[in-house]
Image: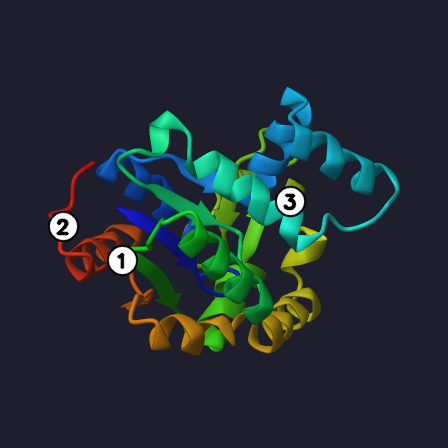
Amino acid sequence: MRMILIGPPGAGKGTQAESLVGSFKIPHISSGDMLRGAVKAGTELGLLADRYMKAGDLVPDEVVIGMIIERIGAADCARGFMLDGFPRTRPQAEALDAALKAARVSLDAVVLIEVPDGLILERITGRRSDPETGAIYHLKFKPPPPELEGRLVQRKDDTAEACVARLDKYHRETAPIVPFYEGAGVLVRVDGVGSPDEVFVRISAALGAAPAR
């Protein structure tokens, strides 16, 4: 199974990615982790990316795409892969599509986890973390023990203002990739409302696979 996982911030992509790569026995290719791994390994593209980052510049899309093509050519991707974190814009999607075609690699699915903005706000703004243990709680969905409430903190990224800004950026920059992949016939829409297990069952069914853990 060769797939890309997309969706708004707070849609549960991280949780579903972990379940799906375990179910399909494929590697999880996070663009950020891949970039850091290539730099650490000192590959040609990694060294090139490192020069951009040290200069305080964004790594060009063509370099990131080159790394992706290089990575999916590895032996552990023979059964497929899950790409997460890229593409984030329609031009990136178009450029990646061209590179995949040149490499004779076709996607089986682009899974879109759909969650209403109102629920996204509730999910994100209700999160709290314990600075002593690193544990994550939610005021509604996973309430902390009463004795811990006084020391829990809210991350700056989890405030209502930050969440609204992230959702706005998603709708402006990332959402336009949805019609692109829909036109290509590979988009799979999945309702992301519900428990992680319920969403996982929906994704598995949409992909025509029996859920496995």
The x and y percentages for residue 40 are: 67, 23
In the image, what residue occupies the spot 41% across and 38% down? 28
Residue 132 visible (yes or no): no
- Marking on residue 150: 3
State the SS at label 2: loop
| Three-letter amino acid code of the residue under disc 2 | Ala
In the image, what residue occupies the spot 56% across and 76% down? 171
Whichever of labels 1 and 3 marks the residue nearer the N terminus, that label is: 3
Q: Is residue 140 above or below residue 145?
A: below
- Marking on residue 209: 2
The x and y percentages for residue 24 are: 23, 39
| Three-letter amino acid code of the residue under disc 3 | Gly
Q: Residues within 10 Å of mark 1 (few under 14, many from 20)?
A: some
The x and y percentages for residue 57 are: 83, 49
Whichever of labels 2 and 3 marks the residue nearer the N terminus, that label is: 3
Q: CA distance from mark 2 to mark 3?
A: 45 Å
> Which is more foreground, mark 1 or mark 2?
2
Q: CA distance from mark 1 to mark 3?
A: 33 Å
Of the 4 image quadrants, the one containing the C terminus is top left
